[in-house]
């Protein structure tokens, strides 16, 4: 709703009230229409101020309403009525003015923002475009290039940048509503002809076509199949080439193509899923709102290799006191330099002072004795990690949380090396750790809810999207990656090429296909894990048994490349060739193609034509199937956890919602039928055998993804 009052004798004050972000729900829109009418009709009222309750102006249209029939007064005429008003209307912007919230402000005649406010049109991140005049008014106010940038990226700008762009008229550090009321008093009675943005001519850059063609090409490239950014460019083009009214028609047309699209539903699902994972729960029943985190004032990192350095930077950037420990003298010196460099570059990008004083370095593990939380990030070797945890358990003060950055090893086993296993959790970061948003917080069977709550809270403080998951080999992300990688290898055996597989995955929306990612991260990383699993001993890669391991089909292709030192980019050769070791540009490698032909001949395999559909179905459906096993095992509490992990940590295209959401869009019955089809063709590949939970969901009529948690809960209660 919207509340009305008259202040300072002649200012009508309209306050939006819809906690927590004053979203423009039907009730709020009704409230605005009524209160604006009242303010304009009251003789003593000479000017109007619109503000939001609780220090936030407006988070835009109510996204929750998009799934239902939109009732209530439409936004466009509501904003037109404000712009056409014969009394000055001033927007008092505190907290956020986003989407429809900024469009509302653009309909006002003046905008006053608090210095900490954030403004933007992020609709593109929800698979939409600013459909309440934003694509027509913003270019008229700040010019086409700046408007194109804000609308196609959806980025939030600070009040300072908004002032510099001309989006707002004033920025204040004081109480924004008071400043707006004072301003409204000062402009009462003044002509508003020059304050109605829709009447402004849209500045036409001289090279208009070149500008739009250039932006469209860039947007199509980075969009990787997302349709909203393209529609945003088309809408702004209408502003630059058509009169306002026709431009508004075009905006409406384009929005209609997006509103009901699968991509918009996927992106809005991601919006809410990203918030849902913060409401974590454990099979024990412990939950986010019943488990109190313990404050962390001092944190420590053990092991300053690539991951340890990134974690130290991410911790220091929170303002915490950090101790970074590395026992290898040379590595310690190099790490000190690298970490300082990363902190300085990060601070420069954010326009703040680098937190260099907050971090201290030591070669001695004793230095972490009084830390509240320690993150171990040494080499991925269980024996070494066992020793570290035994030392930490002996050195640290009582109550120190001991966390491991392992990406696959058994958290329970590491906890058993300590006196207080309840204080041990996994904090699995993704490289580069100071950049990647995802954090898997891994609870073991004896991890206390307080340890999980503390790790989740620290993750949020580090700006991470943290997901609480159970302990198992590879946790969630890497566990699902294994069948996906395995399928990619099998497809090569059966006739595909790395180029074909990668093209299919990249056209689906992944930034990089599986083989280009493998070359980037290094083939030797996976090889080491397979050796750890007893799957890749040297002499095993040749002979008849080469393609059967532990009673199931296995492809030694990756092992064979590693045995020849082809580790990918770092060696200049892998699945692709690169101009030099460390080269980044992948080129097809004729050697690799003849190697595949020889391999197939050696194993009596006959290559067949494989199309992109089969590549997608086999690689993605086995990954999804493992996701269902993870839900069945209770390792992840819900599909949102899995989808957020894949979108934020494994490059799953956001406009596809995540693996589990994608399965719900494709149709669970279809996924089941295809898995059964492929498992029949490949009975020696257990990962293709459909998971019982998938069967149960299909048998219960494939309920919408929002209702899977109920089915899973019922399943667990019956177990
Ligand atoms: C016509 C027009 O052109 C079009 C078509 C549109 O306008 S489309 C809409 C465009 N607007 C947006 O894209 C802005 C989306 N929101 C945000 O970016 C952020 O929320 C925030 C404003 C910067 C605050 O961040 P926060 O970190 O302080 O809190 P939070 O945890 O994020 O949010 C707190 C709670 O509010 C909920 N929420 C936030 N924004 C919402 C919205 N616009 N609609 C519905 N719920 C919303 C959110 O789900 C969470 O709920 P719960 O999880 O507690 O149940």
Image (cartoon, rainbow, N blue to C red):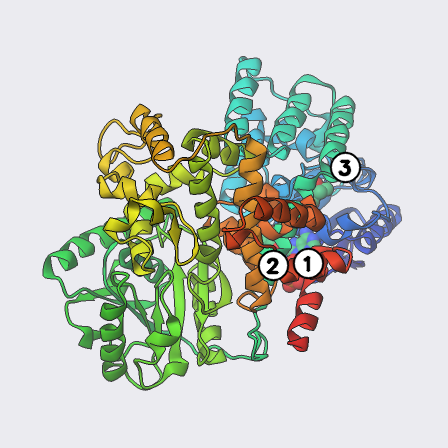
Q: CA distance from mark 3 to mark 2?
A: 57 Å
Quadrant hosting residue 196: top right
Q: CA distance from mark 3 to mark 1?
A: 56 Å
Q: Judge left or right: residue 633 versus residue 87.
A: left
Q: Which residue is mark 1?
A: 695
Viewport quadrant of the C terminus: bottom right
Q: Which residue is mark 3?
A: 83
Determine the secondary structure under disc 1. helix
- The residue shown at (61%, 52%) is 660
Mark 3 / mark 1, whichever is N-terminal = 3
Front residue (pair 613, 147): 613
Quadrant hosting residue 208: top right
Residues tagged 1 and 2 counted as in contact (Cβ below 8 A): yes
Mark 2 neighbour class, 10 Å CA radius: few under 14, some 14 to 19, many 20 or more:
many
Q: CA distance from mark 1 to mark 2?
A: 7 Å
Mark 3 neighbour class, 10 Å CA radius: few under 14, some 14 to 19, many 20 or more:
many
Q: Judge left or right: residue 276 versus residue 432.
A: right
Q: Is residue 286 visible?
A: yes
Front residue (pair 605, 136): 605
Pinpoint residue 449: horizontal percent, then vertical percent. Answer: 49, 79
Pinpoint residue 206: horizontal percent, then vertical percent. Answer: 54, 13
- The residue shown at (34%, 35%) is 602
- The residue shown at (47%, 63%) is 460
């Amino acid at each position: 709703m919207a509340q009305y009052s008259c202040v300072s004798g002649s200012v009508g004050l309209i306050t939006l009230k819809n906690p927590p972000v004053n979203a423009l729900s039907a009730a709020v829109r009704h409230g605005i229409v009524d209160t604006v009418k009242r303010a304009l009709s009251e003789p003593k009222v000479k000017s109007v101020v619109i503000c939001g309750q609780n220090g936030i102006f407006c988070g835009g249209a109510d996204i929750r309403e998009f799934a239902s029939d939109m009732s209530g007064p439409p936004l466009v005429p509501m904003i037109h009525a404000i712009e056409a008003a014969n009394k000055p209307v001033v927007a008092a912007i505190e907290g956020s003015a986003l989407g429809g919230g900024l469009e509302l402000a653009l309909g006002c005649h003046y905008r006053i923002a608090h210095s900490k406010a954030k403004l933007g049109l992020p609709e593109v991140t929800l698979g939409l475009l600013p459909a309440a005049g934003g694509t027509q008014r913003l270019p008229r106010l700040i010019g086409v290039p700046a408007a194109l940038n804000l609308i196609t990226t959806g980025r939030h700008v600070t009040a300072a940048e908004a002032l510099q762009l001309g989006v707002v008229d004033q920025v204040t550090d004081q109480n924004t509503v008071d400043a707006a009321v004072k301003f409204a008093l000062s402009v009462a009675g003044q002509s508003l002809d020059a304050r109605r943005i829709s009447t402004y001519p849209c500045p036409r850059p001289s090279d208009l076509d070149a500008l739009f063609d250039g932006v469209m090409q860039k947007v199509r490239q980075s969009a990787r199949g997302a349709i909203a950014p393209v529609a945003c460019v088309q809408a702004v083009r209408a502003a630059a080439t058509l009169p306002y009214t026709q431009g508004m028609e075009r905006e409406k047309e384009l929005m209609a193509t997006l509103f009901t699209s699968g991509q918009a539903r996927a992106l809005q699902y991601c919006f809410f899923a990203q918030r849902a994972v913060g409401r974590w729960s454990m099979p024990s029943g412990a939950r986010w709102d019943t488990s109190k985190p313990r404050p962390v004032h001092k944190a420590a990192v053990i092991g300053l290799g690539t991951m340890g350095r990134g974690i130290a930077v991410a911790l220091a950037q929170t303002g915490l006191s950090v101790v970074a420990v590395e026992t290898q003298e040379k590595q310690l010196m190099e790490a000190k330099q690298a970490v300082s460099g990363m902190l300085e570059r990060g601070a420069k990008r954010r326009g703040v002072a680098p937190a260099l004083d907050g971090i201290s370095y030591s070669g001695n593990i004793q230095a972490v004795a009084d830390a509240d939380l320690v993150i171990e990030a040494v080499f991925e070797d269980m024996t070494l990690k066992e020793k570290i945890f035994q030392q930490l358990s002996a050195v640290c003060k009582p109550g120190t949380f001991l966390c491991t950055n392992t990406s696959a090893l058994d958290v329970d086993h590491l906890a058993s090396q300590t006196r207080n296993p309840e204080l041990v959790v996994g904090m699995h970061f993704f490289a580069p750790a100071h950049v990647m948003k995802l954090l898997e917080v891994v609870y073991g069977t004896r991890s206390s809810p307080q340890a999980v709550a503390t790790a989740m809270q620290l993750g949020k403080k580090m700006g991470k999207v943290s997901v609480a998951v159970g302990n198992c080999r590879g946790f969630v992300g890497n566990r699902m990656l294994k069948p996906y990688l395995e399928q990619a290898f099998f497809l090569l055996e059966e006739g595909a090429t790395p180029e074909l597989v990668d093209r299919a995955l990249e056209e689906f929306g992944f930034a990089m296909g599986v083989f280009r990612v493998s070359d980037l991260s290094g083939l030797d990383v996976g090889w080491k894990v397979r050796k750890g699993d007893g799957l890749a001993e040297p002499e095993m890669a040749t002979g008849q048994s080469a393609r059967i391991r532990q009673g199931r089909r296995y492809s030694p292709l990756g092992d064979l490349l590693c045995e020849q030192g082809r580790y990918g980019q770092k060696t200049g050769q892998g699945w692709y060739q690169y101009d030099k070791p460390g080269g980044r540009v992948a080129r097809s490698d004729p050697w690799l193609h003849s190697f595949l032909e020889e391999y197939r001949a050696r194993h009596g395999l006959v290559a067949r034509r494989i199309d992109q559909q089969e590549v997608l179905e086999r690689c993605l459906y086995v990954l999804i199937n493992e996701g269902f096993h993870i839900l069945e095992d209770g390792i992840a509490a819900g599909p949102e956890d899995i989808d957020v992990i894949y979108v934020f940590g494994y490059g799953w295209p956001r406009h596809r919602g995540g693996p589990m959401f994608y399965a719900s869009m494709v149709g669970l019955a279809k996924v089941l039928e295809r898995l059964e089809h492929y498992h029949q063709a490949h009975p020696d590949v257990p990962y293709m055998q459909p998971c019982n939970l998938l069967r149960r969901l299909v048998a219960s009529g494939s309920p919408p993804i929002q209702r899977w948690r109920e089915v899973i809960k019922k399943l667990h209660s019956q177990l």
